[in-house]
Amino acid sequence: MNIILALIPVSLVLLGLAVAAFFWAVDAAQYDDLDTPALAPLVDDEAATRDAGPAPR
């Protein structure tokens, strides 16, 4: 039963840190562009393969 008395303050501190991190992320505009990162794997890397020269054998 004594462990609950220790876990409640620890969990409240962790909750406070999570809320602070969330508000920091929103304030720092981390969620402004949600579409571009999802499309990044679909973009061709033509410039990288063109400048690299022929493929080694």
Image (cartoon, rainbow, N blue to C red):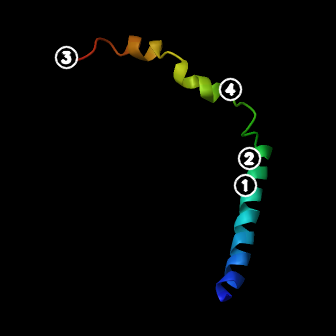
- Residue at image mark 3: 57
Q: CA distance from mark 2 to mark 3?
A: 47 Å
Nearer the camera: disc 2 or disc 4: 4
> Disc 2 residue type?
Ala
Q: Determine the CA span between mark 3 and mark 4.
A: 38 Å
Whether label 3 touches label 4, CB < 8 Å? no
Q: Earlier in the sequence, mark 3 or mark 1?
A: 1
Element at badge 4? loop
Q: Are marks 2 and 4 in contact (CB under 8 Å)?
A: no
Q: Mark 1 belongs to which amino acid?
A: Ala
Circle 1 is placed at which residue position? 21
- State the image quarter where residue 15 is shown: bottom right
For the residues labelled 1 and 4, say whether their Cβ atoms are less than 8 Å apart. no
Asked if the residues shown at circle 1 and circle 2 are in contact, with their CB atoms under 8 angstroms apart, the answer is: yes
Give me the residue at 27% from left, 15% from top: 55
Q: Residue furthest left?
A: 57
Between marks 2 and 4, how big is the CA–CA gap? 17 Å
Where disc 1 sits, the SS reads: helix
Count of numbered marks: 4
Q: Earlier in the sequence, mark 1 or mark 4?
A: 1
Quadrant housing residue 31: top right
What residue does disc 2 label? Answer: 25
* Kind of element beneath mark 2: helix
How far, Cα to Cα, is label 3 from label 1?
Answer: 49 Å
Q: Which badge, 3 or 4, is on the more N-terminal residue?
A: 4
Q: Residue at 60% across / 23% down in the picture? A: 39
**What amino acid is found at the position of numbered circle 4 in the picture?**
Asp
Q: Is residue 53 above or below residue 18?
A: above
What is the CA distance from the residue labelled 1 to the residue labelled 2?
A: 6 Å
